[in-house]
Image (spheres, rainbow, N blue to C red):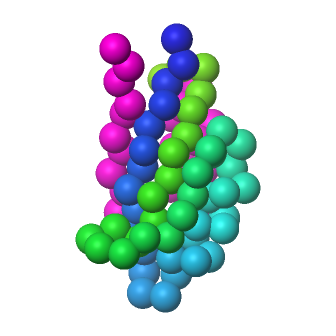
């Protein structure tokens, strides 16, 4: 079963654009856009399983310069 999630990202002031561009280059990321409000970037990603999601996507997102906080929201299907 594949894992999909939205990740809401807060960035340092003025870094939303560069963070969104860097995240868009990560394999498995299907959406990365700057937004307004309490978060600066929203992304959606998917991986074959939770372990792969953490190892191949989350670890790379957390390494992007300019990110101050993330909130991961897994997608559930009925």
State the image quarter where residue 57 is shown: top right
Question: Between 66 and 77, which is closer to the camera in this rendering?
Answer: 77
Rendered residue at 40%/62% (across/down):
9
Rendered residue at 42%/87% (across/down):
13
Can the viewer see residue 38 in this picture?
yes
Left or right of 16: which side holds 26?
right
Rendered residue at 59%/28% (across/down):
47
Rendered residue at 36%/44% (across/down):
72
Left or right of 23: which side holds 40?
left
55 falls in the magenta region:
yes
In the rendered view, would you say 8 is above or below 54?
A: below
Write the start and end of the magenta stretch as one range.
51-78
In the rendered view, would you say 63 is above or below 37?
A: above
76 falls in the magenta region:
yes
Can the viewer see residue 66 in this picture?
no
State the image quarter where residue 36 is shown: bottom left
Indicate the quadrant containing the C terminus: top left, top right, bottom left or bottom right. top left
Q: Residue 15 location, x and y as percent?
A: 52, 81
Q: Residue 71 location, x and y as percent?
A: 33, 51
Q: Residue 52 location, x and y as percent?
A: 58, 26
């Amino acid at each position: 079963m594949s894992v999909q999630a939205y990740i809401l990202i807060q960035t340092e002031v003025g870094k939303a654009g560069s963070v969104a561009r860097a995240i868009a280059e990560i394999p498995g990321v299907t959406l990365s856009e700057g937004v307004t409000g309490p978060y600066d970037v929203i992304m959606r990603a998917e991986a074959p399983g939770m372990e792969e999601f953490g190892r191949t996507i989350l670890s790379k997102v957390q390494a992007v310069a300019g990110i101050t906080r993330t909130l991961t929201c897994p997608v559930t299907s009925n």
